[in-house]
Image: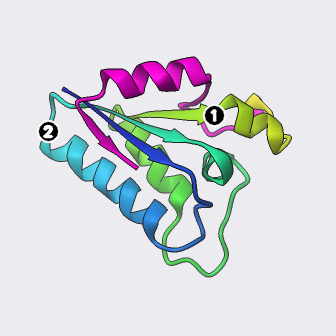
Amino acid sequence: MKALIILRDAPHRGKHFYNATRLAQELLRRTPNLSISVCLTANAVLAATAQYKARGQRYDIRDMLKHFIVRKGQVLVSGRSLDARGIANSELIDGARRSSEEELAAATSEADILFQ
């Protein structure tokens, strides 16, 4: 079974990003046979950069993504969104990887569960 979570909003704007990341971690913990991917587009790509740090937050989204990756979650980062923000592949956290629109389309069509 495959699940895909697509995030677009900046990680420090509201609780959507935080809650989606928590959900992804919990799904991995409870459902060992689930393959889950988080796709970051638009301003959400900022969370996957090594230098990202939101001020005033009680949690570290970047650390949450790293923990998700360690537990075998996949983090796909939109190449177009990276380019639009001048972010190089070398600036991504370990385990997060640049992806294409074709890869996102394939992940979407293959997903049994889709969260946005």
- Circle 2: is it few (<14), some (14-19), or many (20+) Cα within 10 Å? few
Question: Left of 52 or right of it: where is 112?
Answer: left
Could you tell me if the residues under marks 1 and 2 are in contact, i.e. CB atoms within 8 Å? no
Question: Left of 105 or right of it: where is 3?
Answer: left
Residue 113, relative to residue 105: is it above or below?
Answer: below
Residue 35, relative to residue 55: is it above or below?
Answer: above
Q: Quadrant of residue 18?
A: bottom left
Q: Nearer the viewer, residue 73 or 11?
A: 11
Tag nearer the camera, 1 or 2: 1
Q: Earlier in the sequence, mark 1 or mark 2?
A: 2
Residue 112, relative to residue 57: is it above or below?
Answer: above
Give the color scheme: rainbow, by chain, secondary structure or one colour: rainbow
Residue located beneath label 1 in the image: 78
Question: Left of 72 or right of it: where is 75?
Answer: right
Residue located beneath label 2 in the image: 31
Q: Nearer the viewer, residue 58 or 33?
A: 33
Q: Which residues are magenta?
A: 90-116
